[in-house]
Amino acid sequence: MQLKKRQSPTFQKIGAPLAAATCALLGQGTSNEVRAQELQPWDIDTSLLIYSEDNNRVQDISLNGLARKELREDSYLNLTLAIDTLTGASPSGAVPSTVVQTFTRPSGDGQYVIGAGQEPLDDTFQDTRTALSANWEWPVTRLALLSVGASLSDEFDYTHTGLNAKLARDFNNRNTTLSFGAALANDTVSPVGGSPVPLAAMLEVGNDANKRGDQSKDVVDFLVGVTQVINRHTLVQLNYSLSQSDGYLTDPYKILSVVDPVTGNPVPGPAGSGLYRYLYESRPETRDKQSLFGLVKRDFDGNVLEASYRYMTDDWGVDSHTFDVHYRWNFDGGKYFQPHVRFYQQTAADFYERVLFNGAPVPTFATADYRLGEFDGLTLGVKYGQETSSGEWSARVEWYTQTSTVDSTALVGSLNTLDLYPDMNALIAQFTYKFGGR
Amino acid sequence: MSSPIVRLCLVGSVLAVLAGCAGVEPWDRDVLARPDMQIVSDPLEAAVDDHIYFSKEASSGGQGFGGGGCGCN
């Protein structure tokens, strides 16, 4: 919806037609100089993000940039760049134990040892990710805007390529906008040390008999949405989206512990490995996700409330609810203050198992990845911003926590004394500076 | 969630209701034209948040495409 550009009561937008009309009356063509003056120069957004989980878990320092340029009237080029530097440790999926546990690193060329009572974290987690995208939008008719784009990202063990297109058509005196979009992606994962055979047992250092080569997946997204002006102060948006993934959807670095169903202690692994028994996880090769998203944006005497809700469901058994509220207080001098609350809740995937029991049939699919378990998430944050002569700077700080739901069937024997479902707490800090011809 | 047909009817009903909204004339859009009243008023913040929550939760997308392009999930 081109509210800002099309309905802004400025003389800028009528400048080009006026110049054209004037030139036509004078028997001259529109001069290039006049055209050049009407096009907006580059708008640049830059930001530094620090994401930090407690207990030496994932740390991310991210540099992000967005550049937007008007190529022709109402035709824009958008370019984005993101560079992430990731370090820290990530939960492997194995459960803590009352005994010391030794694991083979994913690379297969070393081991790491987790003390009794400690959460098994794989401390080799580090990567640099570079992501680029380009998007071009232009009016195909007086009331329809088409945008097409491409995206590319690269990590040490992961490559993504994607294409997307979206058509937005205004109706009802530009009070209603219908949008249709589609996106295609192809991702390749090249796990360090190879991709494990699903549900194969972890082997000793140097033994790669259970590892395979690169894997890939395709993702197709569809989106249909409507944006509606309710009155002079209120907008609403409603979207339905469908996402279908096909291919390798397993996390090659996640494992499950196999424990004694009575004592809860780890059981011996493959003969000669010197390890306890850990199985690499296994997920289905297809996943269909559907989302319904609603948003309300309302002005209250110059301040802005933004509230949204998303319901998501997929064929893995995950259902989620997300509530998100921002309230922006605008003050004199271009200053603003904006608190933020986000509440998230999801059910577990059907094949989520915190632990596998020795002697029981091994399921076709199983994961102990906490992100596919049942948990609640809460985010609380504040943001302060200040307009400048050429743009704006802002800073925000947020606190994000996840609290998992305990499945008592996993709490057998010694596991009763251990924390199988630790909370995850993260600090999010972002500094943004915007400048250009806006 | 119920069948696709029910969902389609639901979306259709909402569209019908929205089409009945009186709307706002172009000269009354000063408030709606403000940058802080745009649907996505801070694209970089939205992109960063999408990336964080995509990495840490089983859900993604909704307002835009489902995200992805990351080995983090």
Image (cartoon, coloured by chain):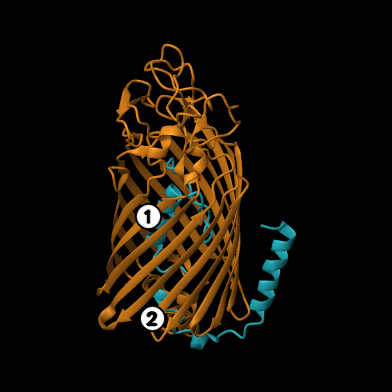
Q: Is mark 1 on a helix, strand or loop?
A: strand
Chain letter of the residue beneath label 2 in the structure image: A
Judging by the rendered image, the residue that carries numbered circle 2 is A303
Q: In this view, does A378 lie above or below A257?
A: below
From this viewpoint, is residue A254 visible?
Answer: no
Pick whichever, A337 or A120, lies toward us.
A120
Chain letter for cyan, please.
Answer: B
Q: In this view, does A363 lie above or below A270?
A: below
Please report contact status of discs 1 and 2: CB closer than 8 Å, yes or no: no
Residue depicted at 47% across the width and 56% down the height:
A135
Chain letter for orange, please.
Answer: A
Relative image position of residue A427 (x, y in whole percent)? 30, 55
Pick whichever, A224 or A290, lies toward us.
A290
- Count neighbours of disc 1 (C-alpha within 10 A) and say few if under 14, some if 14 to 19, many if 20 or more: some
Q: Is residue B44 above or below residue A60?
A: below
Judging by the rendered image, the residue that carries numbered circle 1 is A401
Asked if labels 1 and 2 share a chain, the reply is yes
